[in-house]
Image (spheres, rainbow, N blue to C red):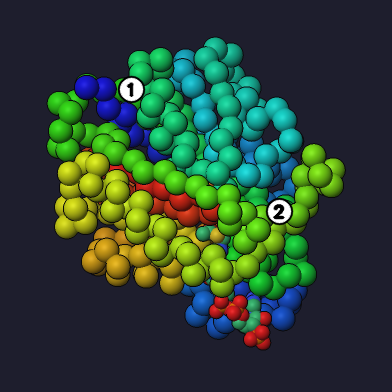
Amino acid sequence: MIRSVVRGFGSCLPKRIVTNKDLEEQVATSDEWIVQRTGIRQRYIAGEGETTASLGEGAAREALASAGLSVDDIDMIIVATSTPDNTFPAVAVNIQNRLGMHHGFAFDVQAVCSGFVFAMTTADNYIRSSMVRRVLVIGAETFSRILDWNDRTTCVLFGDGAGAVVLEAMEGDGTAADRGILSASLRSDGAHQDKLYVDGGPSTTGTIGHLRMQGREVFKHAVGMITDVIIDAFDRAGLTAADLDWLVPHQANRRIIEGSAKKLDIPMEKVVITVDLHGNTSAASIPLALASAAADGRIKQGDLVMLEAMGGGFTWGAVLLRW
Ligand code: ACO
C-alpha cells in the first residue's frame, strides 16, 4: 500500500516582529488582555517585498534542502492560502516559477485556517492514486494585508508566515505501524460563513476587503468541531489518543488548543505550541509548528502526529500521520 511520508520540512517568517506592546500604540489594547485571552505575545508582519509567494518560496526551499531533493524531484505543488499575491494566477504557480520548476503542475486550495489539512489530504490522494510521487505542500499567508488595523477585536490575533513539507510516496504494509499519512477527516458547513469572513472580493465589491469575525461564536464551536474530527481520524486508523506522541494544532488561540487537548485527555507536554511567537498565521500555522518541533528534535521518525484545524466557512479537519 502506498503511503505519503513527510521527507522534508521548512519555514519562512517575515523579518519584522510586532509585539503586543507595539500594538498598544496602535489600538486600545494591552499585552495583558492579549496574552490572557489568546496566549499570543508577538507575531511577524510582512514588510515591503515580502508576499505570500516570497514567504512560501522561502519555506519550500528549506523543505527541499531538508529532504535532500531539488525541484527536479517534485511532481506537484499545492499551496494552502486565503491571501494570494493576486486573485489569479495561483500562488502555487508563482512559487513554481520562483523555484525554476517548469514541469508538473501546481494549484492553490482555499479552506482558510484549515487549508493545510485540506492540502495534505489532497496531496495524499494524488500520491496514493500513483498520479504523482513527490509533492511540495505549502501553507503561506499574509493576513496582515486583509486586517482592519483599527479593529482591536481582530488585528491583535493574526500574523504572517509560511511553512512547507515534502510528501513522498513510500511502500507500507497498510497497518497503523506504517510511516506516512494513516487517516484523515474533513468537514465544512457553509451555514457558518457569516461568523468569520472577508467583506470583499473580486465578484462582489471588487476590493480585497477586510477580515470580520464574531470571535465568541467561533470560540463556541471550535473545541467541539476539532475534537469530532480528531476522534474520527483516530477511529479510521484504529488508534486512540493514548497512542499519540504529538498534537500539532492550528495555532489560533491557546485556550482553544488547551480545551481540545483536555477534552481528548492529551497532556499539554504532547502539544506543540507556537501561537505565542507567531500569532494565528491561518493555513501557515500547522507547517510552521511542525517545522519548529521537527527542527528542534521533539518530533522524531516513527512518532504518531495529529494535525488539526478549524477556520472560516466553517471548515475543519484532522490528519493523522506517522513521522
Ligand atoms: N484588547 C482589549 N480589549 C478587547 C480587545 C483587545 N484586543 N478585543 C476585544 N476587547 C474587549 C471587547 O470590546 C469587550 O469589551 P466590552 O466587554 O467592554 O464589550 C471585551 O474585550 C470582551 O470581548 P469578547 O469578544 O467577549 O472577548 P472574548 O473573551 O470572547 O475574547 C477572542 C475574544 C480572543 C477573540 C475570543 O472570542 C476568541 O478567542 N475567539 C476565537 C476566535 C479565534 O481564535 N479566531 C481565529 C480565527 S478562527 C480560527 O483560526 C479557528
* Mark 1 neighbour density, 10 Å: few (under 14) some (14–19) many (20 or more): some
The picture quadrant for ligand 1 comes to bottom right
Tell me the residue that label 2 is attached to. 198
* Residue closest to the eye, 41 or 192: 192
Q: Position of residue 284 (x, y in %)?
A: 52, 47
Rendered residue at 51%/43% (across/down): 115
Q: Position of residue 265 (x, y in %)?
A: 23, 66
- Say which mark, if any, is on residue 128: 1
Residue projecting furthest to the top: 103
Amino acid type for the residue under numbered disc 2: Val
* Residue closest to the eye, 28 or 224: 224
Can residue 140 be spotted in the picture? no
Q: Position of residue 178 (x, y in %)?
A: 18, 33
* Mark 2 neighbour density, 10 Å: few (under 14) some (14–19) many (20 or more): some
Of the 4 image quadrants, the one containing the N terminus is: top left
In three-dimensional space, the C-alpha distance between marks 2 and 1, rounded to whole angstroms, equals 35 Å
